Image (cartoon, rainbow, N blue to C red):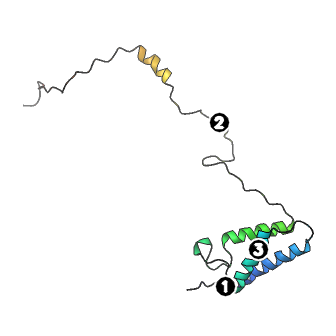
Amino acid sequence: MPREVDPKKTRKALRRLERTRRKIAEKQGEDTLSEWEDEFITSVGDRLETYGSAFNDPDKGRLDDALSGLQTAKLREIEKKADGKSRKPMSRGKGFGQSGFKSKTKSPGPRVRDINEDIGDVAGEPPAPPRPEGPPKLRVIKGGGD
């Protein structure tokens, strides 16, 4: 069962591809597209004209869109390159639990127990009584309920 793609969205995607192609043709002598980017624009355009959509897997984007999420992002990147804007590298982030803000309070330090501090306290205490050897012995406690 083929997907129902909005024809307006297909035409809009085709116009974006053609606009990008024209911008690149105007710049002809300068930094043009790589072979891969040119092939990408051509193949996406062919699939849009043939099928009305450039992707088939519903996990790759919204079902009523003509381009998948990654195709849209790559096309945006190619458009910026055609405009002469440089590409920003992806940020690596700071990981979990760290934000861009610095705390005004002093950090408490690591939560680590120093065993050397415990040794000094144990030296002043009397040694524990020795544990009896063998199985436990049962005995009757006087004064219990009759």
Specify whether 65 is left or right of 83. left
Q: Who's the residue at 73% across and 68% down the image?
A: 74
- State the residue position of label 2: 105
Is 137 in front, or is 31? 31
Q: Are marks 2 and 3 in contact (CB under 8 Å)?
A: no
Q: Who's the residue at 10% across and 31% down the image?
A: 145
- State the residue position of label 1: 51
- State the residue position of label 3: 39
Q: Quadrant of the N terminus?
A: bottom right
Helix, strand or loop at label 1? It is helix
Helix, strand or loop at label 2? It is loop
Q: Position of residue 76 (x, y in %)?
A: 76, 69
Q: Amino acid at mark 3?
A: Glu
Nearer-N-terminus badge (1/2)? 1
Residue 134 visible: yes
Quarter of the image for residue 133 reads: top left
Q: Position of residue 4 (x, y in %)?
A: 61, 85
Q: Position of residue 14 (x, y in %)?
A: 76, 81
Q: CA distance from mark 1 to mark 2?
A: 60 Å
Residue 9 visible: no
Is 128 in front, or is 41? 41
Q: CA distance from mark 1 to mark 3?
A: 18 Å
Q: Quadrant of the C terminus?
A: top left
Which callout, 1 or 3, points to the residue nearer the camera?
3
Q: Amino acid at mark 2?
A: Thr
Nearer-N-terminus badge (2/3)? 3
Helix, strand or loop at label 3? It is helix
Q: Who's the residue at 45% across and 19% down the image?
A: 119
10 Å crowding of disc 1: few (<14), some (14-19), many (20+): some
Nearer-N-terminus badge (1/3)? 3
